[in-house]
Structure formats: structure tokens, C-alpha cells
Image: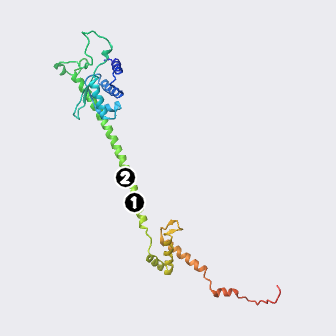
Amino acid sequence: MNYIKHLTGFFEKVVIDKALNPTHVSLYMALFQFWNCNRFKNPISINRDEVMRISKISSKATYHKCLKNLHSLGYINYEPSYNPFKGSHVILFNFSEDLKPASKSERKLKNEPLIEPVSEQALNKSCTSSETSTEQAVVPSINYINKTNISNDKNVANLNEQAKKIEDKNNIQLKNQKSKEEKSSAKKEEKKQPTIDEIKSYFQENNFPELEAQKFFNYFSSVGWLVGGKIPMIDWQAAARNWIINSVNFNHNTDTTPTNRAKNLNTTTDKNYAEPL
């Protein structure tokens, strides 16, 4: 079979057939590729996923609709298989005969399947280079398609497994990040404000009066326990120690008594105010 003449005849039919659209042509070319791989022996065994991948058809409904349209319009003979372990059969017609005129006695019916009748004895013979039966031609086609399907299924399974691993990894990372955020928020919640009793006890442990503890509590309570009015207090005990140190220095610098001020006015020599300046 001359596939160039066949395609020429097919496209001549496509030009005058207004019922076809680009999706029909794409599907037929995919089926033609399967037919070519089967050395133009009919029927061919097809797999839906593989044909959809080659024809670039993404919708199953569109695939089945176009396949039935090609069957009803006489481009193919579609024999669906409802067995998931067995592919459907498709018979393609030879359109190369439509290009050359033939006598009425030799003219064959148009769209006649390329299946040669064979005797029962020929079916039982082994496959040789000079003689091949129809049944023997069908089996290699099915085996070829099945091998292709198994390879594609393995590739799809590997891609699905890799996608699942990546998704699981992302979920683990998100879970760990969420756990860290929860721990961080829990730690922040644990840093509660100290009570007046805790502050008094801490000041007494450092031999500091209870009055200063009350001042410390009142001051930081008024500013919302913020250091400098901006930063939240992390360690109130460290702030209490600074309060004690600053309080001691402040009391030491301001420790001036009236006795000391009087001593500063005493002089060792008497001043004579009658003398001119």
C-alpha cells in the first residue's frame, strides 16, 4: 500500500467533507500512525490514552465522539472493546485506490478493508517471509501496542510516585514550620507579667525595701511592661536588678544633709566688711 497516495486520497475526501473538523483529522492521523507501525495490516489494536496523547485530544468525550463520527462517515471501522485488558480494534480503509480510475469489472468497493481471505490451513501454518496469515498479523500488532501501553503505564506510575514524594515533602516542611510557629507563640504566651508578690519577694532576696518593689511594679504596669516604652520586657528580673542598681546610685548622689550644707559655709578666717573692696 502506497501511504503517500493513501494520504492524498484521504485529504481529497477531507476537502469536500464539511462534517470534519481539525480534531477529526488529528485523530485520524494518530490512527494512521498506529496503522503504519503495524505495516498497514488490519485490524489494529489501539489504546485510548495513547491515541489521545498522540492526537492531542484531552477530553474523553471529544475522543469518543470523533471516533464514532469517523466510523459513521466511512473513514474507519471501529470495533470497541469493553474489556479493560484488551484494546479496541480499528480497521482503516485504503483511499489510494480512489486516485486512479479502474474498469468496472476490476473496480472494488470503496472503503473496502484490507483483509485478505485465508484458508483454515493457512492459519495453522507458521509465519514465514513469503506467507503470512491474517491472524498472525493481528497478534504482533496487539503485542506491540500492549508493550507500548505497559511502558507508558510505568512512566505514568513513576511520574505519579515522584509527584507524591514531592507533595509529601512539602507537607512535612509546612507541618514543621507550623509546629515551630506554634512553639514560638507558646513561649511568648508563657512569658507572663510578674505579680506584685513575686516582685516583692525578689526585692527582699536582694535586701532591698518593699517600697522600691512597689515603685517598680507601678511604673512598668503603667507603661504596659515595655522597656523604653517600645520593646516588650523579656526578663523582668534583669530589669529589677537594673532598677536596684540605678536606685542605689541615685540615692548616693543625692544624699546631702543640712549638716553638710552648713559645714560648707564655715570659713577659717574672719572677714572684715569695713575694708574697701
Q: Quadrant of the N terminus?
A: top left
* Residue under pointer 1: 182
At mark 1, the secondary structure is helix
Q: Quadrant of the C terminus?
A: bottom right
> Could you classify mark 1 by the number of other residues whose Cα lies within 10 Å: few (under 14), some (14-19), or many (20 or more)?
few
Amino acid bearing label 2: Ile
Q: Farthest residue toward the right?
A: 276
Tell me if residue 135 comes above or below residue 169 in the rendering: above
Q: Residue 185 placed where, x, y %?
A: 42, 62
Q: How is the image coloured?
A: rainbow
> Could you classify mark 2 by the number of other residues whose Cα lies within 10 Å: few (under 14), some (14-19), or many (20 or more)?
few
At mark 2, the secondary structure is helix
Choose between 86 and 274: the one closer to the eye. Answer: 274
Residue 208 seen in the current view: no
Q: CA distance from mark 1 to mark 2?
A: 15 Å
The image quadrant of residue 139 is top left
Contact? badges 1 and 2 (CB < 8 Å)? no
Amino acid bearing label 1: Glu
Q: Which residue shows up at 32% across the image and 35% down it?
A: 59
The image quadrant of residue 41 is top left
Identify the mark nearer the N-term, 1 or 2. 2
Numbered tag placed on residue 50 in the rendering: none
Q: Farthest residue toward the front?
A: 18
Residue 264 seen in the current view: yes
Numbered tag placed on residue 172 in the rendering: 2
Choose between 263 and 135: the one closer to the eye. Answer: 263
